């Protein structure tokens, strides 16, 4: 092999460390996502308590206010992602953060529950999740894209944990209005990070692993196991939101725990649940017991809801039930995206993730509305039993899922020259040991693979690629 081809092959197979630009992009976008999620979730543990003095407040409307953001988020996140292909990622993200800030300001000045609902819906209309993922793909090489997405995912988890602790404290110190002013400030911080830290992409490209293909949505919606997973994330966030419509009221009514001290409950519970989650994730991924651990996590959600239904009048009963709940919840938040990635066809990962995200937001909307209605008609216990029943239904539906294949995604930047040559390479790739699926897209200059790392013959892969690469590949 000549030196030019050796250099090209090395650039394909060895990504090396992340560049300074890639690190800035991943860190900046993670911060933006975290600020936004922190703003959305900080009201969750305290809104039911603080909204009681608003004009027109009823349990149903309080629940609607909590979940309203989910409706507009689900409605707009895919269209905003597609719009970012046309007018630019940063433009859409900027617009979305401004909408989020405006929604926060509307809610901060509200005197009645309907204005709060309008503010929450406006917050959700700043649907920038898809645009952030697309920008992350624009700014990272194929070999590092998974790392960047993982950083963003970790930031979401950390933001949720912080929101559970910070929400009661901020609500106690600043009140409901101050809580929403704080979320407006977080949107401002996100804008500063976007404009000063996140690089601008040189070109916009479509990425099948990170973006939705509208023409292929039907393929995702008719895939049985992807539908099971979509129902799962919808159920999980329905249960989460409905639970926190009811739980703050239970803590206030039965335990006499002051609002700001709710943080003292959530902090150790969240910390311990993360500790308990880690070995289960290791068993799921390393020991290849993903489905078994996944089903166990659903069982934990159901048991936690039964515990809350029985013991929501006792502080220690609530604490124990929450520990079980958040262990299961954090575990599912880690496993569900992995299951989507492993289950989706190689060229539909981005589309599958888009539908999955929309299902999550629909779940939050339904959780708020159903939680408020159940409190009004069946009391706090009715909410917890309903959520426990939903977890049981989810377990039955998830039980029919095929065990996920032990595969990982591998993206390779490669030049093939023609559609015919790309198809030929894809066929050859699929014959290699450890390669489960392969698609080569010459227009994007990317080979999308699903591989079993334990069976992949790297030498054969490198040998095959050396026959197809061009002497002077396009730099990324």
Image (cartoon, rainbow, N blue to C red):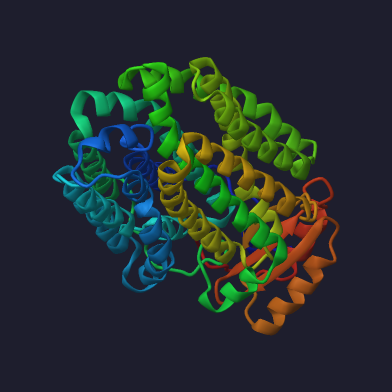
Query: Where in the figure is residue 256, as x and y percent of width and height?
Result: 37, 16
**Closer to the camera in the image, 427 or 356:** 356
Where 8 falls versus 163 (above or below)? below
Front residue of 35 and 59: 59
Q: Position of residue 454 (x, y in %)?
A: 82, 45
In this view of the protein, can residue 470 be seen by the observer?
no
Location of the N terminus by quadrant is bottom right
**Front in this rendered view, residue 25 or 231:** 231
From the top left corner, tell me how far across and down residue 356 is, in percent: 55, 58
| For residue 450, above or below residue 243 | below
Residue ID at (35%, 46%)? 66
Nearer to us in this view, 279 or 356 = 356
Q: Position of residue 443 (x, y in %)?
A: 56, 77
Q: Name the residue at 36% across, 71% down.
A: 83
Q: Is residue 54 visible?
A: yes
Number of marks in the rendered image? 0
Q: Residue lying farthest front? A: 377
| Above or below, 131 relative to 222 | above
Relative to 252, 290 lies left or right: right
Please state if 316 lies on the left or on the right of 450 as rendered. left
Q: Residue at (76%, 77%) from the top-left corner?
A: 424
């Amino acid at each position: 092999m000549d030196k030019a081809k050796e250099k090209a092959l090395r650039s394909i197979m060895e990504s090396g460390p992340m560049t300074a630009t890639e690190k800035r992009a991943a860190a900046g976008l993670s911060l933006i996502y975290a600020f936004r999620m922190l703003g959305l979730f900080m009201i969750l543990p305290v809104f039911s308590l603080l909204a009681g003095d608003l004009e027109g407040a009823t349990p149903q409307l309080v629940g609607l206010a909590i979940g309203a953001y989910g409706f507009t988020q689900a409605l707009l996140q895919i269209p905003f992602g597609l719009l970012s292909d046309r007018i630019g990622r940063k433009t859409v993200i900027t617009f979305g953060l401004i909408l989020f800030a405006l929604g926060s300001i509307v809610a901060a000045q509200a005197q009645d529950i309907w204005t709060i609902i309008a503010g929450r819906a406006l917050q959700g209309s700043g649907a920038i999740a898809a645009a952030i993922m697309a920008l992350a793909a624009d700014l990272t090489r194929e070999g590092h894209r998974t790392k960047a997405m993982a950083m963003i995912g970790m930031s979401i988890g950390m933001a949720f944990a912080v929101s559970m602790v910070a929400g009661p404290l901020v609500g106690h110190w600043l009140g409901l209005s101050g809580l929403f002013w704080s979320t407006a400030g977080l949107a401002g911080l996100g804008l500063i990070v976007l404009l000063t830290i996140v690089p601008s992409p040189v070109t916009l490209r479509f990425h099948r692993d990170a973006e939705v293909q509208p023409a292929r949505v039907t393929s995702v919606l008719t895939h049985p196991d992807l539908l099971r997973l979509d129902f799962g994330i919808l159920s999980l966030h329905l249960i989460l939101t409905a639970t926190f419509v009811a739980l703050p009221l239970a803590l206030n009514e039965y335990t006499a725990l002051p609002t700001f001290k709710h943080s003292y409950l959530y902090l150790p519970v969240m910390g311990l649940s993360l500790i308990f989650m880690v070995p289960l994730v290791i068993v799921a991924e390393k020991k290849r017991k993903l489905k078994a651990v996944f089903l166990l996590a659903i069982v934990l959600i159901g048991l936690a809801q039964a515990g809350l239904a029985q013991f929501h009048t006792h502080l220690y009963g609530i604490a124990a039930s929450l520990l079980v709940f958040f262990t299961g919840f954090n575990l599912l938040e880690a496993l569900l995206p992995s299951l989507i990635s492993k289950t989706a066809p190689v060229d539909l990962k981005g589309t599958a993730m888009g539908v999955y995200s929309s299902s999550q937001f629909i779940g939050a909307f339904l959780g708020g509305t159903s939680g408020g209605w159940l409190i009004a008609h069946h009391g706090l216990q009715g909410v917890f039993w309903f959520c426990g029943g939903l977890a049981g239904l989810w377990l039955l539906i998830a039980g029919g899922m095929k065990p996920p294949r032990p595969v990982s995604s591998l993206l390779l930047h490669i030049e093939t020259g023609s559609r015919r040559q790309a198809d030929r390479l894809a066929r050859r790739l699929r014959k290699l040991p450890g390669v489960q699926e392969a698609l080569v897209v010459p227009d994007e200059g990317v080979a999308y693979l699903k591989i079993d790392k334990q069976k992949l013959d790297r030498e054969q892969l490198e040998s095959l690629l050396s026959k197809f690469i061009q002497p002077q590949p396009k730099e990324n």
